[in-house]
Image (tube, rainbow, N blue to C red):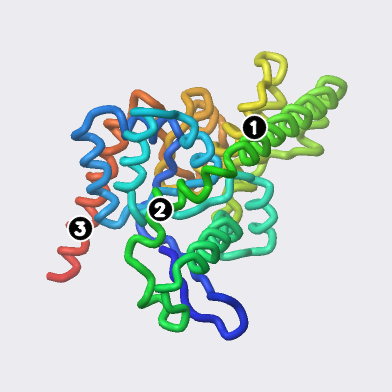
Amino acid sequence: MITVSPHPTELFSMRASVNGLTVFLDNFAIIDLAKGDPNRRKRFIATLNRGVEVLFSESNAAELSGPQGGSFKTIREFLDEIGTHWFPIEFRPDVCIEREKEQQELPFFCERLIKTFTAERLKRSPEIKIADLPRSLPSDFFRLGHFMDWLAPQRDEIINGKRQMGIRLGDRIMDHWTEYQKNPGWLDDSLPELPFRADRPATFVYTNLLRLLVRDAKGWTIVPNDGIDFGQAVIGTAYASIATLDKNWKRRVDKILPKPNRLAKTYYQPQLDNMVRDIERFLDNAALRRGHGLC
């Protein structure tokens, strides 16, 4: 939830909070939920009205603004159905890791992006009285479709940033791999395996996944898109309750990361039906527990 209120010296102040179940959707999941089984789509949207929030990044928006024609229209309608049940997140794990070191309350919150969006919309909306915030704010002010429209002109810049992140990741992996080949003990000395810490989940995922990639670097070819896939695997599994990932990244997260940990439960493309069903069951069980608490 994002709350906007008056501020004595700035245009407004903003507060963010996340309550209940959070879901990170990779773009394949957004597209499949939008264009696939209509009943599954309806059921997923219904869970949002029961307190579930979608974690959504500018990386998601940039990729999804690419399709044109009927395909884009269907995806856009789905995003509008998500409405205000979403939360803007960073897609760069290094930013989140630095914030974890600083012990920030919500290290994954992309305040920079949503503040700019809010400021520009407020300046173009004279009917919204700043002094009366949040009461004067329309209920659909943070509708995801509005955010997509605002971000669309920045698509090329965002995609280029993702590409550069992929290149940096590839260079880092190959540099580490070269050291590892010269001295197998280098990996444990310079990049030791980390145990899970609830206050530093992104640090845990990032470090241990990077170790895995260094060990496996000879067996796969690094492409620029691996950078964003790596970043999404880190952010999604570190901060969401449920995350959708590419099959290979799901395998790495599920089988390789040290246990125990409190990371997201992960699903890949053929498991979206299971994901929606599991979300419904979680909500039903939570409602049942609340009901017992009232007895």
In this picture, residue 179 sits left or right of residue 205? right
Q: In front here: 225 or 246?
A: 225
Please identify the residue farthest to the bottom as the structure is shown.
8
Q: Is residue 256 visible?
A: yes
Residue at x 55%, y 38% (from the top left corner): 232
Amino acid, disc 2: Trp
Q: Which of pointers 1 and 2 lies earlier in the amino acid sequence?
A: 2
Residue at x 67%, y 32% (from the top left corner): 163
Against 76, is 32 above or below?
above
Mark-to-mark CA distance, 2 and 3? 21 Å
Against 93, is 182 above or below?
above
Badge 3 vs badge 1, beta-carbon distance below 8 Å: no
Residue at label 2?
Answer: 86
Question: Of the residues tagged 3 and 1, which is closer to the observer?
Answer: 1
Mark-to-mark CA distance, 1 and 2? 24 Å
Tell me residue 142's x, y (percent).
41, 59
Q: In front here: 37 or 206?
A: 37
- Residue 287: mark in rendering: 3
Residue at label 1?
Answer: 227
